[in-house]
Image (cartoon, coloured by chain):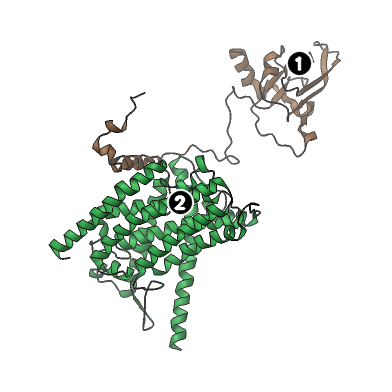
Chain colours: A green, B brown
Amino acid sequence: MELLIQAGIALAKILIVITVMLLTVSYLVYFERKISAWIQNRRGPNRVGWYGALQPFADVFKLLLKEDIVPSNANKFIHSLAPFITLFVSFATYAVIPFGPDIKLFGRTIQLALADVNIGVLYVLALTSLGVYGLTFAGWSSGSKYSLLGGIRSSAQMISYEVSMGFSIAGVILLSESLRPMAIVESQYGFMWNALIQPIGFITIVVSAFAETNRLPFDLPEAEPELVGGYHTEYSSMKFAGFFLAEYANMIIASAMIVTLYLGGWQFPYIDKFGLSMGLTAGIQVLSFLLKMALVLFFFIWVRWSIPRFRYDQLMNLGWKVMFPLSLLNLIWVAALIMIFNI
Amino acid sequence: MPEKKREKDLTIAEKLYIPEIVKGLGLTLKSMFRPKFTMEYPEVKFIPPASYRGRPVLVQEESGTERCVACGLCSRVCPSLAIEVQASETSLEKERYPVKFEINMLRCIFCGFCEEVCPEEAIVMSKDYELVFRDRSEAIYGKDKLMVPIRQVEDRIEFLRNFK
């Protein structure tokens, strides 16, 4: 019986998270289009539903009805496998992100995270590196030079920026003394946000997150003027939609990771000092997590429509000669802080 | 044109990227709140100025007859051979009139040569830009569709008199 209830709670959490996730992904696409329109003094989609609110669904239906074309000299198996790898990786990562504190419901404690894994951060790092395979496979198996170049670029880029990302996460782990996302969030109580304690690390992780998610200014794998569509040139219909969804899901993961590691996760500064009831506190904390995520996502979109694309050599220079030393510097800074102030 | 800046000319703040990126972000944020220029077409329609070259039309006099004397200059000058005129005699003062005047709107390129060459100000470009047909035969506009009362094209005629 106990086991059944546990399983039921887990299932409910999974359902809620997946639904929220899918809805956010589709509305992220909508907001990307809206914000890009506003930045360019346009109105953006406003025909389907209230202010175009049903536009994401119209897009999905359009893609579903399209013909699924596989090039004749493609490796068919890997060609079909690649979008699934990308999608799987981006959705599986979300399992360890905590979105709220422990709450007490009907006499039992429920953790507001799908899985409170003690190596959560490592799990995220491992899975995001797996994501490279999706793009590289897609590029290689399409049998097209544009796709291949896009795939190679994406793997080079993601491997390069993984280094500085890893080191900027290491700074956080030094401070929190744990790889558990929950513990990392709890260590950022009040205004002890890592973004304020280690600003260099914050900058490096944000830049690496842009590179890892293949977003502008680092969207070289799909640089339209040179590579047509990059790794997804030869994809159509739902397989293309898979890549499209995965890109936005990756953005959500990246913003959730930035919020968890650097912006205090679900912490609302000194909320427990306000003397609010348990449920209200938890609600505000979950909301503050979502709000922080929304702000980071807005930043992602905002940057995309402001900054032009880097050249490939500039990207590699920035990755290895600037971001990597900066993230090491951040690590030393954090170590020095711990040595001097014993925090 | 300001002198192009080379990498060695950049100040330290510019080399750091970040202040410049913040400046750029500020600019885009500002333009997010600027008024939009979009006209939402089916609800709000663009009313072109008199210089606009829309669908060519035949000017219909107050009396109900067309001004055209079927000289055939327009059909002669038309670069895309869109106009076909067939003349006939009439008891009116102008002596000739077109029995058949057809413009193939699939061929028309809206160059305005016909109105430029017309000696009678009988064919002018209107402000009509909504041209829809379901098949090719529908796209051939006869006299019934081309005749437009003179009141509707007055400002175009005025424009032609000033600027032609």
- Pick whichever, B14 or A154, lies toward us: A154
Q: Quadrant of residue B154?
A: top right
The spot of residue B30 in percent (x, y) is 37, 41
The spot of residue A156 in percent (x, y) is 42, 51
Q: Any mark on residue A154, and which?
A: 2
| A179 in relation to A169, above or below | below
| B44 relative to A21 in the view: left or right | right
Which residue type carries mark 2? Ser
**Residue farthest along the left direction in this orientation:** A340
| B143 relative to A152 in the view: left or right | right
Who's the residue at 48% across and 76% down the image? A11
Name the residue carrying label 1. Answer: B76
Which residue type carries mark 1? Arg
Label 1: element kind: helix
The spot of residue A323 in percent (x, y) is 31, 50
State the quadrant of the C terminus of chain A: bottom left
Q: On what subunit does the disc labeled 1 rest?
A: B
